[in-house]
Amino acid sequence: MTSEPRLPIAAIVYRPADHIEPVLEEAAQRLAERGVRLGGILQHDLPTCVEDPCGMELEDLASGERFPLSQELGSGSEACRLDPDALAHAAVAVRHALESGVELVFVNKFGAQEASGSGLRNEMAQAVTSGTPVVTAVGERFLDAWREFTGDAGTLLEPRAEDIVAWWDELSRPA
């Protein structure tokens, strides 16, 4: 019996109550300590105040630069706070990581933007088609869009850093 080959892309599947940012951060730290050349971006929540539960910033893993992901829209706004300029900055960071020859790209998540065909979707596809593995996170509500994006040939992981590291070890093991 033959099975379809897996793409070098993995996503931790999370539920609304899961706090995935520390999981991705821990996995990235463990892999970097082992000498894996990392690129891409990670998200960090900014617990600046109770009135702003949506404050977020992104970290470029290659440079260490951090930049805001959410924009201020005023106290009465109910619109999406995602800053389009920050998303463009993140896309450039991922592309730069690919151009510099990193071994593994982190993309904070495959979310609403990616599920609708935008966000960092093109950068994830570019990484995989160039042969650079990608690890990300996907919320359960976007799992169907994720499966469509990967042709159901990606790897789904539990939200644990050790699962990401084990996936990388299996992927990078010589054939």
Image (cartoon, grey):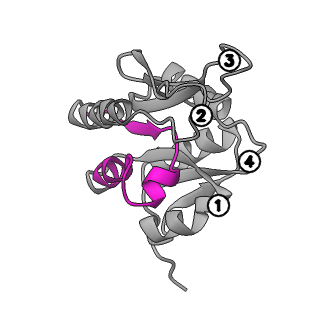
Q: Nearer the viewer, mark 2 or mark 3?
A: 3
Percent of width and height locating residue 63: 35, 17
Q: Quadrant of the C terminus?
A: bottom left
Q: Range of the magenta residues? A: 101-128
The amino acid marked with disc number 3 is Pro
Picture residue at 72% right of the left edge, 36% below the top: 19
Determine if the magenta segment contains residue 96: no
Of the numbered discs 4 and 1, the one sitting upstream in the chain is 4
Foreground of the two, 35 or 146? 146
For the residues marked 4 and 2, what is the alpha-carbon distance in whole angstroms?
16 Å
Which secondary structure lies at badge 4? loop
Picture residue at 54% right of the left edge, 49% below the top: 170
User: Is 111 situated above or below 1?
Assistant: above
Residue under label 3: 47
Determine if the magenta segment contains residue 108: yes
Picture residue at 34% right of the left edge, 46% below the top: 132
Which secondary structure lies at badge 1? helix
For the residues marked 4 and 1, what is the alpha-carbon distance in whole angstroms?
9 Å
- Residue 165 falls in which quadrant of the image? top right
Of the numbered discs 2 and 3, the one sitting upstream in the chain is 2
Of the numbered discs 3 and 4, the one sitting upstream in the chain is 4
Residue under label 4: 16
Name the residue furthest front.
76
Picture residue at 26% right of the left edge, 51% below the top: 130
Please rate how many residues cluster around mark 1, counting C-alpha atoms within 10 Å: few if below 14, some from 14 to 19, many from 20: some
For the residues marked 2 and 3, what is the alpha-carbon distance in whole angstroms?
18 Å
Residue contact between numbered discs 4 and 1, judged by CB atoms under 8 Å: no
- 116 sits left or right of 98 in the view: right
Foreground of the two, 142 or 100? 142
Q: Nearer the viewer, mark 2 or mark 1?
A: 1
- 96 sits left or right of 138 in the view: left
